[in-house]
Image: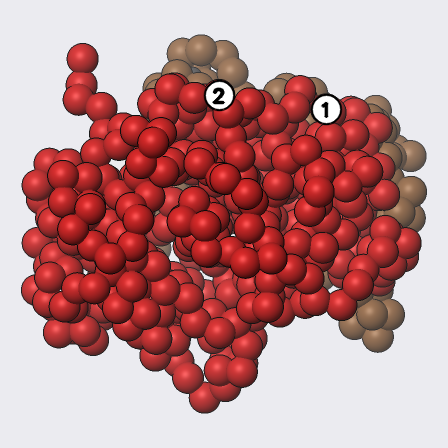
Chain colours: A brown, B red
Amino acid sequence: MNKEIPVENPGPLQTFEDNLAKGEFKIQQCKECGQHVFYPRQLCNHCGSSSLKWVEISGRGTVYSTSVVRRKPERGGDYNISLIDLEEGPRMMSRVMDVEPTEVTIGMQVSAHVGLVEEKPAVVFYNKEQGDKEW
Amino acid sequence: MVASIRGSSAVVGVGLTNFHGLPGMNHMEIMAQAVEKAIADAGIHKNEIDGIFSANFVELLTPLTIAEYFGLNPTFMDGTNTGGSVFVNSMQSAAAALHLGLCNVALICYGSNSATGKFTHPPAMRTVEDVYKPRNPISPYALAANRHMHEFGTTKEQLAEVAVSARQWAQLNPAATMRDPLTIEEVVNARMIVDPLGLLDCCLVSDGGAAMIMVRSDRAKDFPKPPVYMLGVGSRTDHNIISAMPDLTVTPAREAAAAAFAMAGVTPADIDVVELYDAFTINTILFLEDMGFCDKGEGGNFVSNGNIAPGGSLPVNTNGGGLSCVHPGMYGMFLMIEAVQQLRGECGDRQVKGAKLAACNGNGGFLASQVTAIFGTEETL
Ligand SMILES: [Zn+2]
């Protein structure tokens, strides 16, 4: 099916995922207004410009809110779902991986890492490795 | 200056099905039961309906299905889907379409077999949140509740007050699904689903159908029941996925309600009865704050000590709400119908005596779509 068609100009979301598959966490920054954009978009959601570039970021973030999805142990057990405010401004959903799900707290400093969530490449966050650039 | 639609249309018919005991019926069949009752309530023939407003989570092209099912030939249709708020949003569209003469008799309707049927969602756009497996719709509300607790000191006990108040109203409503006594302790100690929300912080999953007929006000008195007038409406959104919500403690209901109150020319202090979309206990607290019934951050205190329960200072969710009365996937229809029935004085043991003004707030998606509507009796026109 579509898999056979070569993608010459992948869209922003595909580019983001391609970067993730290479172990890179990049987000967009607007050349017009300078603000960072996440999730990946065709137009800047701040000023409407289509001049967006992919940039590396510090990976540092702060837990804005956190919750624990309760799941039976035989189905994988409880897991954390957090909203992380990136130093550059955007907020993203993720999981804090190195702290017990119930022990993740609002305001906790965390840093990004390209890892796997249930075998799919994803940006996750660690508390202990804060400050270290992990990807 | 644009023309105001304040008071330009009115609800003249409503219909509700049972909320349980409907196995073997599909969503259209349940909806049709409600439509039959609304048509009878309004004293009209079905062929008078020329405006159709409906959306649900199980099919696309809903207005077309409805026109076909009931044998109608509408001049105006709106199948916009803003989630569970949609029917209040539809009411705004219906009021505008009626005012402009694009239709003359508007039907807003919904049916669902969420409890006894297979509940499926049509495909949604893939998002960057999917990989983390949030347990939607609960996770976004849990994140909002936790942030509210962090910023304002709101407690699990205060969330529980919302559930207990809803249950006390449900105990006065023979049609409500959950009518057993409920205590704060039972809610606080219920099995955790997504922290900090436990099982009893979450709404029911029930069956149910609801339908409403609206006409222009110039002919609203030609129908058997006392008309309930649309005095104000406001609709706002600022996100879809929860990570795109600017501030998890402030919903777009702040702007939606301000617009609705401004159109109606009344303030929260004038309102006799309030119907809010309580999919989760945190909702009631957020919407009371955002609509101006109390200050931001004061919602937890406001709902405490039975203040929104029967006998409290502000009657909220008088049918028992989504938490204890009915929640078939989308609840927005049901809060408007409860408001209409309160203003008609039809609510029996749960009737708010002398209610003349009602405020409704529909919630859609993950605190994303907020639509406030103000209804009033004839003397409030
Ligand atoms: Zn920009």
Mark 2, other Cα within 10 Å: few <14 / some 14–19 / many ≥20: some
Specify whether residue B198 is in view. Answer: yes
Which residue occupies 91% across, 34% down? A128
Label count reads: 2
In the rendered view, does B84 fall on the left or right side of B312?
A: left
Find residue A122 and report its horizontal and vertical position in percent: 66, 48
Which residue is the site of mark 2? B267
Looking at the picture, does residue A29 appear above or below residue A27?
above
Does residue B127 lie above or below B292 as drawn? Answer: below
Q: Which of marks 1 and 2 precedes in the sequence?
A: 2
Q: Amino acid at mark 2?
A: Thr
Res B297 label: 1
Disc 2 C-beta below 8 A from ligand 1: no
Residue type, numbered disc 1: Gly
Find the distance from the CA under tag 2 to the CA under tag 1.
20 Å
Q: Quadrant of the N terminus of chain A?
A: bottom left
Q: Is residue B226 left or right of residue B122?
A: left
* Residue under the point 83% across and 70% down: A72
In depth, the one of B347 and B106 nearer the eye is B347
Secondary structure category for the residue under label 2:
loop
Q: Quadrant of residue A124?
A: top right
Q: Quadrant of ligand 1?
A: top left
